[in-house]
Image (cartoon, rainbow, N blue to C red):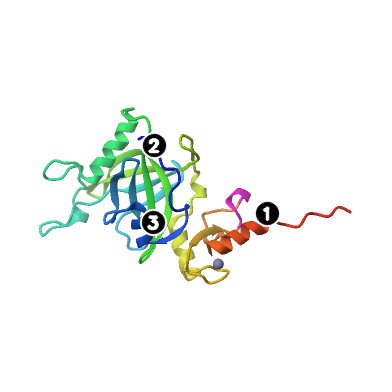
Amino acid sequence: MKSFLPNPKFKVDDIISYIDLTAAEKMNLQKGMNFNVNPEYSVFLMSVRKGAPYADKFDEKTNTLIYEGHDVPSNISNTPKEVDQELTTPKGSLTENGKFFTAAKSYQTNLINHPHRIKVYEKIDSGVWCYKGFYNLIDAKIEYAGKRKVFKFYLQPVEIKSMKREVIIPFNRVIPTQVKVEVWARDKGQCVKCGSKENLHYDHDLPYSKGGTSLTAQNVRILCMKCNLSKSNKILTLPPILLP
Ligand SMILES: [Zn+2]
């Protein structure tokens, strides 16, 4: 992995349309798992909404997002949810599961010195997406889910500080998708201050740096960029304390 773009088009927790997403990645992303969309990273699309097809979740113990691999394509003679997820296609080339599994194992066995990097977007509602940031693929496993084999990919959230330096983000700073979906419905998909539906972002009411939590909808709300900026200006321009 060579020069890395630390300056993505979006900030983490920005709410975007599917068109914004494909414009930023300069491609149509039809699948959930997209290996090496460019030389610097891959893209995962995830969804934990009710009825979402895969069981993605955040694991507090390992501070990783666990992303489930993908099923074989459906055809007339199979039921994808009843058969093993595959490492290779019938012709013998790696599936997307296989490519990411190989990348995770290459890191674990020191064949590559940096984990494979994955940009994650999560689906909030029909046509509504949220940028979730960059993750390092630190492990992968094959597990039994009932009678069949599924892949599990372990992703560690990271913040890219500069070309070289990256900081691991603790799990409780990441707003879970379920919370985002709940807030989206509660705030009716608009800025809670001015009602705008443009340039929206998930905002911590009490900032994480001041002890605010990401894990409940009570501390998360939707703000537009303008109201978000005026909020931070207000904090910066508090009147000076007059001493007696
Ligand atoms: Zn606003």
Q: Give the range drawn in magenta.
A: 206-211
Circle 1 sits on which residue?
236
Amino acid identity at mark 2: Ser
Marks counted in the figure total: 3
The magenta stretch spans residue 208: yes
Q: How crowded is mark 1: few (under 14 residues within 10 Å), some or many (20 or more)?
A: few
User: In the image, what residue type sits under mark 3?
Assistant: Glu
- Rounded to the nearest angstrom, the CA distance separating label 2 from label 3 is 26 Å
Name the residue located 50 percent from the left edge and 59 percent from the top edge: 202
Residue 44 vs residue 75, the one in the foreground: 44
Callout 3: SS: strand
Quarter assignment of residue 178:
bottom left
Q: Residue 122 carries which label?
A: 3
Residue position for label 2? 3
Q: Is mark 1 on a helix, strand or loop?
A: helix
Q: Quadrant of residue 79?
A: bottom left
Q: Can the viewer see residue 208?
A: yes
Residue 162 at x, y percent in the picture: 49, 38
Any part of residue 47 in sight: no
Disc on the earlier residue, 1 or 2: 2
Viewer-side residue, 44 vs 50: 44
